[in-house]
Structure formats: structure tokens, C-alpha cells
Amino acid sequence: QVQLVESGGGLVQAGGSLRLSCAASGRTFIPYAMGWFRQAPGKGREFVASINWSGGNTYYGDSATHRFIISRDNAKNTVYLRMNSVKPEDTAVYYCAADDRKWYSTTYYDPTAESEYDYWGQGTQVTVSS
């Protein structure tokens, strides 16, 4: 089994920065990709960003483009989300997710879809004060 543990959430003022981390542990696991989603109160889960583990290709949701940066440390099996210029509307629970897609898979690859991911963390709260 694979466990994902997020950290780095907390309270930050608007305009500030925060870095979230997510470490994968458990069985020997090399993800195809890892991503971040978020869920604000009363809303559905929203795609934030993802990164492919081998080539490092990145994808960003509209809310993250030009403000957030996703990165990875392959040796530590850890993905990061650097959040810059945060806004009160960034307040949400942020979830880390891991894609265990097989290299031989022929299904359509959509890094923005929840269904693409096989493992999820428990979430970390980010609150942005105005």
C-alpha cells in the first residue's frame, strides 16, 4: 500500500507564500505523476497542479497558473507546491494525489481528472487571511 502525507499547510496573509509538501511511503513506488487538488468549503474538488515523475512535465489549473509552482524530488518521493501571491480564495483543504499509471496503459491521460489518481493524502488546510 502507498501512503501520502501532506505537510506545510497553515494560516498565511494575502500576498504571502507557502510551500506544501507531500511524501509518498509504503511499498516500493515510483509514481507516474503526482498532483495537487483543493477543496474549498461548499465546493467540489478542484485540480491545482500535477507533475510527471520521469520527464517533469507540469500542468496547472487556471487558479494556479503564474502563481503556484509544482516540483518534485525523485530521491525522496516527494512533491512540493510553492504557493505565491496567495489570495483569500485560495483557502481550501489541499490534497496530494499519486498516479500509479502503468507505462503500457493506453487509456486517455488526463492529469486534471481526479479519476486519474490512485492514492490520496488526508489533506492539509490552507487559510489565507485578507
Image (cartoon, helix red, strand yellow):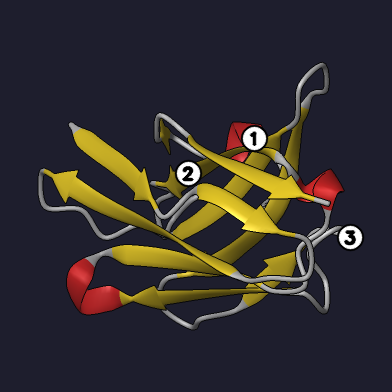
Q: CA distance from mark 3 to mark 2?
A: 18 Å
* Marks 2 and 1 close (CB-CB < 8 Å): yes
Local packing at callout 1 (Cα closer than 10 Å; few below 14, some 14-19, many 20+) is: some
Task: Check disc 3 and report the residue beneath it.
Answer: 62
State the residue in front, 112 or 109.
112
Local packing at callout 2 (Cα closer than 10 Å; few below 14, some 14-19, many 20+) is: many
- Decide if residue 107 is in sight here: no
| Amino acid type, callout 1 | Glu
Q: How many numbered tags mark residues here?
A: 3
| Amino acid type, callout 3 | Asp
Seen in the picture, residue 64 relative to 48 is either above or below; the reply is below
Task: Check disc 2 and report the residue beneath it.
Answer: 97
| Residue drawn at 31 percent across, 42 percent down | 4
Task: Check disc 1 and report the residue beneath it.
Answer: 114
Q: Which mark is first along the chain, 1 or 3?
A: 3
Q: Which mark is first along the chain, 2 or 3?
A: 3
State the residue in front, 108 or 87.
87
Residue 71 screen position, x and y as percent: 49, 76
Q: Secondary structure at mark 3?
A: loop
Q: Is residue 5 left or right of residue 126?
A: left
Q: Which of the 4 image quarters holds residue 45?
A: top right
| Residue drawn at 20 percent across, 53 percent down | 29
Residue 77 screen position, x and y as percent: 25, 64
Residue 117 screen position, x and y as percent: 52, 39
| Residue drawn at 55 percent across, 54 percent down | 35
* Marks 3 and 1 close (CB-CB < 8 Å): no
Q: Is residue 107 left or right of residue 42?
A: left
